[in-house]
Amino acid sequence: MLHDLTALEQGDAVRNGDVSPLELVEHYADRAGSVEVGAFITTTHELAREHARRLTSLLAGSGRPTDAGPLWGVPTGIKDLHATAGVRTTFGSAAYDDFVPDASDDLVLTVEAAGMPSLGKTNTPEFGSPCYTEPDVAPAAVTPWDPSRTAGGSSGGAAAAVAAGLLPVAPGSDGGGSIRIPASCCGLVGLKPSRGRISGAPRYGDPVGLATAGTLARTVRDAAALLDVLAGRRVGDPFWAPAPSGPFLDACDRDPGRLRVARFITPVITDVDVHPSSVTAWDDASHLLESLGHDVEDVPVPIPPDAVADFETCWAVLTALSPAPPGREDRLRPLTRWLGGIGHAVSGPDFGLAIGRLRQHAAAALAALAPYDVVLTPTLARPPALVGELRDDADPARDFANQKAFTPWTSAWNVTGMPAMSLPLHWTDDGLPVGVMLAARPAEEELLLSLAAQVEQAAADAGAAWVDRRPPCW
């Protein structure tokens, strides 16, 4: 079946003339009606067909463009936080259930220009805030490995789609773990790149610098190839990462050399017991890295507990920056209203001071970790939670506390701006995926991808290739 192929293999098939972009779109559009994991809020199959027909016509006429990348002709989806001209864009909120923008975000235009038809707007929670995807405008996004459990958030729809074979690869976004959390829940590779690696144009909606777009894929190479599509600086970007030495995909074929790996497992943002499966995944990953010749050392947690209050202040203000249209405030979820209320109560000077302190904490953490090439932690404190288990509309403060206990490490690398990846290296006895997280120095995605590809190959050599694992709905 076409969806058995990786995204890069599908791109090769298009280039070789074995399949057309339209055939790929039709295949995935057909699958969308037979597998229900809450992947999409709005489908755009006819728009995808129109785009694919144009690409297929090019192949029949002048041929594949000379500057086409390896994913040209491969379908994808757009997270519903990204405005898409002429397509309903809800931001995961019932307050925007009928909103149709007249202009697209830069990411949407970039994906279209790369020759990747979009099959729809992937599911996301309200304004991308929670670490679960249970919006009021669509069914919950669930992991294909157990539909009673969450796909994570906020890129839960994108992750569910890729893991269920409804999309070959998909962009997501990550302000506190929103790519890596769903990657762990769905058994995928999830890459949050460095701050400034992918432009936030034209809205630049995060003045703190926590959030970035990134990639969700079944393989490290697919994740790297999509990063090559998305990466790039735009005039006016408030911060940017230096250009890589070449395509990120090429980094996957390099030997990373002998690396110094720092590791810690103590939760960063809350005091919570770590599930044995997360401990096992982290410990097994440590041994695997040592077997590959890397030096693994225990280090103290590099971010102090008092950084958490500053992060929460910034998070609350960012929530307050996403208001409902006038007269629709009652359609916002209780969690959004609660966080937004906290944000509105923060004064301008206090917000500025919180940002400053957060950057000081980031600088101290980067200095402490500077001797090391990468850092290893668990991705999540436990396997995927049951749908509804973290959410608590009656007590939003408890809801927020539940989220912190679920994901006590991921936001650290949003604070520092470091690139970070979740890799599906472990599975529970009952078949649930458990990710481990690797982070590298800022702007060192190439090193991170090189190591991740080495780890992926080592897992395959040991008979545990994660790309060969298929959920029941596959």
Image: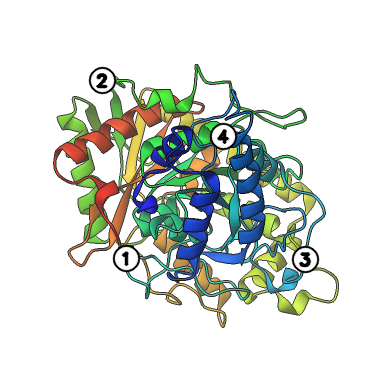
Looking at the rendered structure, the kind of residue marked 1 is Trp
Q: Is residue 137 above or below residue 317?
A: below
Residue sitting at the far front: 60
User: Which residue is pictured at 23% across the width and 58% down the height?
Assistant: 277
Q: Earlier in the sequence, mark 3 or mark 1?
A: 3
User: Which residue is pictured at 67% across the width and 45% down the height?
Assistant: 108
Mark closer to the observer (3, 2): 3
Where residue 184 appears, as percent x and y from the top left, is 37, 54
Q: Is residue 451 above or below residue 87?
A: above
Q: CA distance from mark 3 to mark 2?
A: 51 Å
Residue sitting at the far bottom: 394
Looking at the rendered structure, the kind of residue marked 3 is Phe
Looking at the picture, tell me which residue is in the foreground, 362 or 238: 238
Mark closer to the observer (4, 2): 4
Where residue 393 appears, as percent x and y from the top left, is 57, 79
Residue 99, which numbered label?
Answer: 3
Q: Which residue is mark 4?
A: 229
203 sits to left or right of 24: right
Q: Which residue is mark 1?
A: 145
Q: Which residue is mark 2?
A: 258
Residue 301, which numbered label?
Answer: none
Q: Earlier in the sequence, mark 3 or mark 2?
A: 3
* Circle 3 SS class: loop
Looking at the rendered structure, the kind of residue marked 2 is Arg
Would you call the spot at circle 4 few (<14 residues within 10 Å), some (14-19), or many (20 or more)? many
User: Which residue is pictured at 66% across the width and 36% down the height?
Assistant: 199
Contact? badges 3 and 2 (CB < 8 Å): no
